[in-house]
Amino acid sequence: MASKRANSSAAAPAAKRSRPEDKFETVVEGLKQAQLPAAVMKTLCSIVPYCLGVPSEQRHRFQGEAVDKIESVLATVAGSLEQQIEAAQVAKGLAHEKALSQKAELEQARGVAQTRQEEAKGQK
């Protein structure tokens, strides 16, 4: 006769199901970067799984409108992030040019200092 423990250990625990909200976490994080009033933000974030979790051909008209609004907000966020990237790249380029200029000035100053040291040694 087999023990109860042997039977219970043979059955592996079922894998945990992910919450529907987990699938759309990236979308919600993107929405949170938008400059929206708190109530609008909360509403949009709360409806994401109920709109995007439904296949497009099965969505109600209001779900479709909500998806359009979510898409619009995410496009605005993406545009803002692209502008920030471009501004950072310009700043990086300016900083690089300034660093090269300062490096050239440093090399020139070293050359002048070395020339003056050699002149000072020659006068002794």
Image (cartoon, helix red, strand yellow):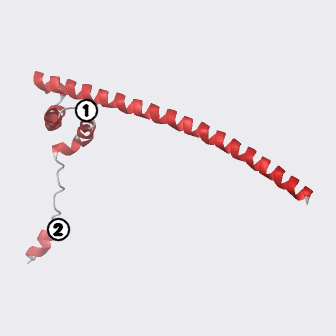
Q: Residue at x 25, y 37 (%)?
A: 27
Give left or right: position of 45 versus 33. left
**Most foreground residue, 29 or 113:** 113
Q: Residue furthest front?
A: 124
**Most foreground residue, 1 or 10:** 10
Three-letter amino acid code at the position of disc 1:
Gln
Q: Quadrant of residue 68?
A: top left
Q: Residue at x 13, y 26 (%)?
A: 63
Kind of element beneath mark 2 = helix
Where does the image place residue 81, in percent across and percent down from the top left?
37, 33
Where does the image place residue 16, in percent across and percent down from the top left?
17, 55
Q: Which residue is mark 1?
A: 35
Q: Which residue is mark 2?
A: 10
Q: Residue at x 24, y 35 (%)?
A: 31
Where does the image place residue 44, in percent across and percent down from the top left?
16, 33
**Most foreground residue, 84 or 101:** 101
Q: Is residue 107 visible?
A: yes
